[in-house]
Image (spheres, rainbow, N blue to C red):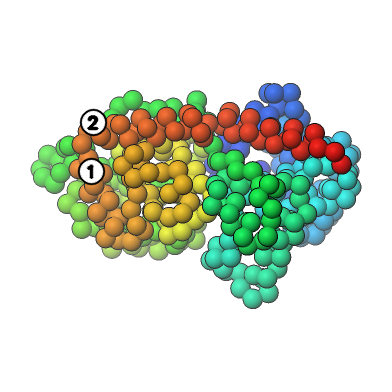
Amino acid sequence: MTLGVSLKQWHTSGQAARESNIYKRFCSKGHHVSMLTYGKDDLEHTKYWSPITILPWAGRINHFIKYAFVAPFYYWGVFRKANIVKSNQSPGSLVGLVGKIINPGLKWIVRCGWVRTKNALIAEGKIGWLLKRALFAEWLAFKTCDAIIVTTQSDADYVVSSYNIKPAKITVIPNSVDTELLYYKQELPDFSGTNSGANSRTIKLLLVGRLAEMKNFHLVFEALHKLPNTFEIDAIGSGSYKSTLESCAKRMELNVRFLGNIPNDEMTHQYHTHDLVLMTEAWGSGMPKVILEAMATGTPFLSSNIRSVRQFVKDCVNGFICEPNIEAIRAGMKRVLNSDKAKLNQIRQSARQDIENFYSMDACVESELELFHSLLSKKQ
């Protein structure tokens, strides 16, 4: 797992259902999966994760990085029997490197749900020595692993150009959604009754994600402030920016509910009971799962015109895109709310079809298994 992340954190943040469903699919196909975690009490979740084997934090070391060095030795027998070791994100790749020392025949894969670009690392607060150390860790992982998984071609291009990695070493496997869990909402949202007036219908908006400045939820609030419509806004997620967002919502006189984290297997209800999803973040790499989930459920969405979105969302084809600033978000909202009903339904159907064709969990698991078999078939 990612350096320092535990199963308890996944359950608290609502990610457990999504992540467990992926790896349970590997088990259902006859493969054995063990998860090395950074939680000392993670065996409490054994029943939920079965048949996956949990390898919790062991020993007396209380430092994440130091533990990453010794964890493969605690679980020597598991690493000796394994033939694939994969990091869930690039932070945490140290375990793979040490595992390779224990078992030279092990194929080590670095997965990047999103590539930690230099700008992203700086945004995380890494400067000076901390930035250099983080970039070196990325370089070391990419250079010494057997394969790299990224979710988009632009992330692959970044790894090639920034770290001088051979393109053949990189496989693009997009993020995925469980199409059975996140089923399509047949009912089309009706925006015709949302115009300002005594009988206008309230528009239910959904914001999903970490409560951080880069998500631009505060710009959404400011953009909505001057629109004539009535809004009910639900924000799902947690983060240090919550108090700022609460103040902003109060200042803009908006009805906003901060719902905290909600388990992923309960999110279908949230998408189905809202008219529109807004995800107008300032920047990002990888492939935003919130947008994929909105597409799967047939919920209209307005997203940022940024690199990570443009690769799978086409404006007015399978979704709506705008620039991540107040005026553009406001104009984008007007565009969605004034959309022709037939056109809006066509966009929703196109989005769901794209999910089924390219981003279903079953399809992505098959792509990953193809990579595994390819690596294992190569001579040492």
Q: Residue at x 57, y 30 (%)?
A: 363
Q: Is residue 84 left or right of residue 328?
A: right
Please tell me in which quadrant of the rendered image residue 232 appears: top left
* Residue 247 position (above or below residue 80): below
Neighbours of disc 1 within 10 Å: few (<14), some (14-19), many (20+)? many
- Residues tagged 2 and 1 counted as in contact (Cβ below 8 A): no
The residue that mark 2 highlights is 342
For numbered disc 2, what is the local secondary structure? Answer: helix
- Label 2 vs label 1: CA separation? 13 Å
229 lies left or right of 371: left
Kind of residue at disc 1: Leu
Residue at disc 1, secondary structure: helix
Tell me residue 297's x, y (percent).
Answer: 41, 32
Label drawn at residue 109: none
Res. 37 in view: no
Q: Is residue 188 above or below residue 96?
A: above
* Left/right of residue 129 with respect to residue 66 in the rendered view: left
**Residue 195 appears in the rendering:** yes
Residue type at numbered disc 2: Ala
Query: Dividing the picture into quarters, in which one does residue 160 lie?
Result: bottom right
At 13% across and 46% down in the image, what residue appears? 196
Q: Residue at x 40, y 27 (%)?
A: 184
In this view, the residue in front, 201 or 142, is 142
Foreground disc of the pair 2, 1: 2
The image quadrant that residue 252 belongs to is bottom left
The answer to which of marks 2 and 1 sits earlier in the sequence is 1
Residue 235, image x, y percentages: 40, 48
Q: Which residue is disc 1 drawn over?
A: 337
Identify the residue at the far left of this view. Answer: 198
Residue 8, percent from left and from top: 64, 44
The residue shown at (45%, 37%) is 293
Give the image location of residue 65, x and y in percent: 76, 59
